[in-house]
Amino acid sequence: MKKIRKLGILTGGGDCPGLNAVIRAVVHTAQREFDLEVCGILDGYAGLIHNHVRKLELTDVSGILPRGGTILGTSNRDNPFRYADDWRGVKKEYHDVSAQAMKTIENNGIDVLLAVGGDGTQIIAQQFYEKYHLPVIGIPKTIDNDLNGTDVTFGFDTALTIATSAIDKLHSTAESHHRIMVIEVMGRYAGWIALESGLAGGGDVILIPEIPFVIGSVCEKINDRARKGKRFSLVVVAEGARAEGGQLVVARQVQDACDPIRLGGIAAQVGNQIEDMTGIESRYTILGHVQRGGSPTPFDRILATRFGYHAVVAAVNREFGCLVGLRGREIKTTPIKEAVAEPRRVNPESDLVKTALAVGTCLGK
C-alpha cells in the first residue's frame, strides 16, 4: 500500500468566506500532526489542467484565518471533463482533458486531492475518483447551504449575517419613507439564506424557491399591514423564487460554468407587481456578491478549521471518495456520490417554515 506523503488542495466554484481558514487548517494539520507535504492547486481545476501548483508552507498560511476569499484563487469554469479552450469565444469546442489534469497530479507527486467546493466541485472530484481511482476527499463550501452530507456548509453563516445586516439597514429607510423594500438574496435553487435572514431581520414576506408564491397573497399581506397602520413592509426574496405556475427569472446564461444559469431580477419583478397592485411605492435591492465577501464569522472560521483538520485525518485513514461534514455537533464522512445526488433544500413542512408562519410571516401562499 502506497504511503501518503503529499496532499494537494484546491478551492473550486464561487469564493466564500472561510476558504483560507480551511487551507490554513490543512497545512498546519498535515505538517504538524502527520509530517505531510501540502501543495496548493491554483484557480480550482484550472490549476490541474495547466499545472499551476505551488508548495504550501506554514509561513504561507500565517495570518490568513480572518481573510475572505482564497489565497489559491478559484474558478467556477474549467471542468477537466468538459473543457473549452477559449470560453470567451463565440464558438466553443469542448474536450475531455482529465488525463492532462492527472499528469499534473502525478508530476507533482500528489497522493490525495482535497477538493474544497460546492456541488459542482464535488461532482468533478467524484468523476476523478471513479474514472482514475484518484484518492479524493471533499470539503463542503457554499454560501447557499445546499450541499447534502453536512448540516451546514461554511460560508453560509457569513452570508446570512451580511444579509441580515442589510435587512436591518433597509428596515429604517422603509419605515421612514413608508415604502415596500424588496431585498433579493442569493441561494440559487435553495431558500436557506432568504428564509433565515428573513426570520432574523423580521421580514414581513419571505419568498423561497421551495414554496412557489402567489403575488395576490403577498399583496394581501402588505395591504393588511397598511390597514393596521403599518405603512411599510420588508419582502425578502431568494434569487431562485418563482411565482406559482411561473418560471425562474434568469439574468443570463454562461455555458461553460458548472451551472450555466445565472439567476437574478426577481426582486424587480416582485417589487413592480406589488407597487402596481397595492399603490404603495416600492424599491428593490439586490445584495449580490457582497454576500460572498469579507471576513468570515467566528462560526465559519471554526467550522472551516474543523473541516480542514478532519479532511487530513480522513486522508490519512484512507477514507477516499468521502466528504467531511457536520452532523449534529460531530464531523463525520459521507460518500461524495451520496452528497451530490440531490441538493439540500428547505423542507416546506420543516420546523423553520412553521416557525416563520407562526410569527406572522407571509411565505406567499
Image: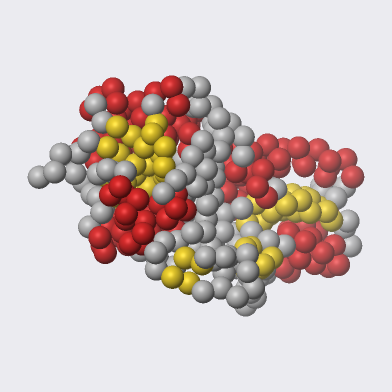
Q: Position of residue 150 (x, y in %)?
A: 37, 47
Q: Position of residue 338 (x, y in %)?
A: 30, 59
**Which corner quadrant holds the C terminus?**
bottom right
Whether residue 297 sits left or right of residue 49 in the image: it is right
Q: Is residue 345 above or below residue 162?
A: below
Q: Position of residue 104 (x, y in %)?
A: 35, 50
User: Image quarter for residue 98?
Assistant: bottom left
Whether residue 273 sits left or right of residue 23 in the image: it is right
Residue extending farthest to the front is 107
Whether residue 232 is visible here, answered yes or no, is: yes
Q: Is residue 218 above or below residue 40?
A: below
Q: How is the image coloured?
A: secondary structure
Q: Is residue 189 above or below residue 155?
A: below
Whether residue 178 sits left or right of residue 312 in the image: it is right
Q: Which residue is drawn at the image coordinates 38% and 26% (left, top)? A: 57
Q: How many marks?
A: 0
Q: Which residue is drawn at the image coordinates 84% and 56% (left, top)? A: 282
Residue extending farthest to the bottom is 245
